[in-house]
Amino acid sequence: MSNWKIPLFEPDLTEEDALAASAPIRRKWLTMGEETARFEAAFADRLAAPYAVAVSSCTAALHMALLALDIRPGDEALMPSLTFVACANVARAAGAIPLFVDAIGEDEWSISPDDLARKITPRSRVVIALHYAGFPCRMNEILAIAREKNLFVIEDCAHALVSDYAGRACGLWSDVGCFSFFSNKNMTTGEGGMAVARDEAIVERLRWLRSHGMTTLTLDRHRGRAFSYDVRLPGFNYRMDEPRAALGLSQLRRLDANLHRRRELYGLYREALAGVERVTVPLPADARGIGVHIMPIALPPGANREAVMRGLKSRGIQSSIHYPPIHRFTAYRDPSGDAQCPLTEAIAERQLTLPFYPGMSAEEVRSVCRALGEILEGAQ
Ligand SMILES: *Cc1c(COP(=O)(O)O)cnc(C)c1O
């Protein structure tokens, strides 16, 4: 438990979840079992996806996605700089070179199709697009560029659980969609993730990569359906276990009610923030069909963010930053200065993320915005 009066995030966990997660322990079957198969089927059903592959994290899903698409050492993987560093880390792990793409602008923070097109080289093989805060990036334009330049597309759907784009769920527009069930996401299994793909051959490779490249499962051998196995490609242990899958199933049952509440809170925030001078929300007002994940704002130009965060903290309100740009991290800094993302740098200076979770009350939303207004006024 934290001492925050209003934390950045609070997971929605119930007694029902606890019972569900403990059932596999009582059954004495902890991994590679029926809960995982059921969770995959229920998740695929919710997204209207043909297949879903449960994994140990979204990072694992992103890593497997690159390998399933046969991304090789020396290939370039393009991605926004304004995203979580996992995307760059898995590209490096696959031997690929991450190339950082700028944001569209100060009012729209997702990956810029124009800058993407500009940065593609003959060695570019894949784009990892993020649906920031759960709002779809400009998928149509990204897909058109990818088709023209012969690139694969991976969607990082860690925020977009579940978001609709033109009548189809985010994650199903590209070669592989990767979801996270980390504890602060729209639903959680503690650690966990899911990969979705429409191509059966890719799904088969994802399943091999998840479990050492092996062709048969422990459960099949346990049931006497198989006695041995082949190894098709070098894989990992990226599996999800049964208590997590059972928790995921239980969480999935409340997902839509929680998404509804997230959209309500988003509307309340927009209303309350309209009264805070010079603070902007870089997202569309219309959140219909969107699994709003976080509540990012842009502070007024020149505002001292650290002072604002300290002011909020002194009132018991937690805040955060999504994200420090990847191209500024020591591990990814380009000494030649070629990783030009000037808009991302301008955005990153002003970015602040406010508390946002289904258990929040309308009064708490108003009190966060009131505090923000007071702090900004006092700082002038
Ligand atoms: C949370 C997150 C991830 C990583 O998910 P894990 O399940 O923790 O590996 C990747 N990308 C983004 C944008 C995220 O928010």
Image (cartoon, rainbow, N blue to C red):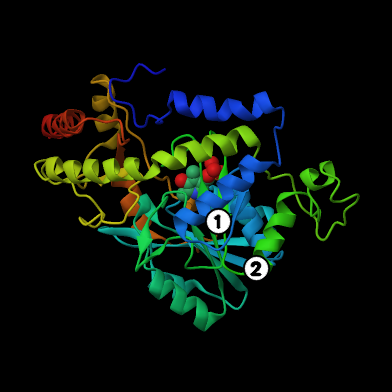
SS assignment at label 1: loop
Q: Which residue is mark 1?
A: 335
Vertical side of 259 occupied by 53: above or below:
below
Q: Residue at x 10, y 43 (%)?
A: 277
Q: Nearer the viewer, residue 251 or 102?
A: 251
Horizontally, residue 52 falls left or right of residue 48, namely right
Q: Position of residue 74 (x, y in %)?
A: 69, 66
Write down the quadrant of residue 335 in the picture: bottom right
| Comes first in the chain, label 2 or label 1 | 2
Q: Is residue 202 left or right of residue 365?
A: right
Q: Amino acid at mark 2?
A: Glu
Locate residue 107, reporting x and y percent: 25, 58
| Residue nearest the observer in this picture, 350 or 190 | 190
Q: Secondary structure at mark 2?
A: helix
Pick whichever, 366 or 41, lies toward us: 41
Viewport quadrant of the N terminus: top left
Residue at 22% in and 50% down: 281
| Mark 1 residue's CB less than 8 Å from ligand 1 | no
Tell me how far mark 2 sits from mark 1, CA to CA. Answer: 41 Å
Ligand 1 closer than 8 Å to label 2 CB: no
Image quadrant assignment for residue 364: top left
Q: Could you tell me residue 40's position as x and y percent?
A: 58, 50
The answer to whether residue 55 is visible is no
Q: Position of residue 37 (x, y in %)?
A: 63, 47
Front residue (pair 325, 13) = 13
Observer able to see residue 274:
yes
Q: Residue at x 49, y 53 (%)?
A: 327
> Is 158 left, or right, of 310 in this rendering?
right
Q: Residue furthest bottom?
A: 148
For badge 1, the amino acid type reads Pro
Label of residue 194 in the image: none
The residue wearing badge 2 is 200
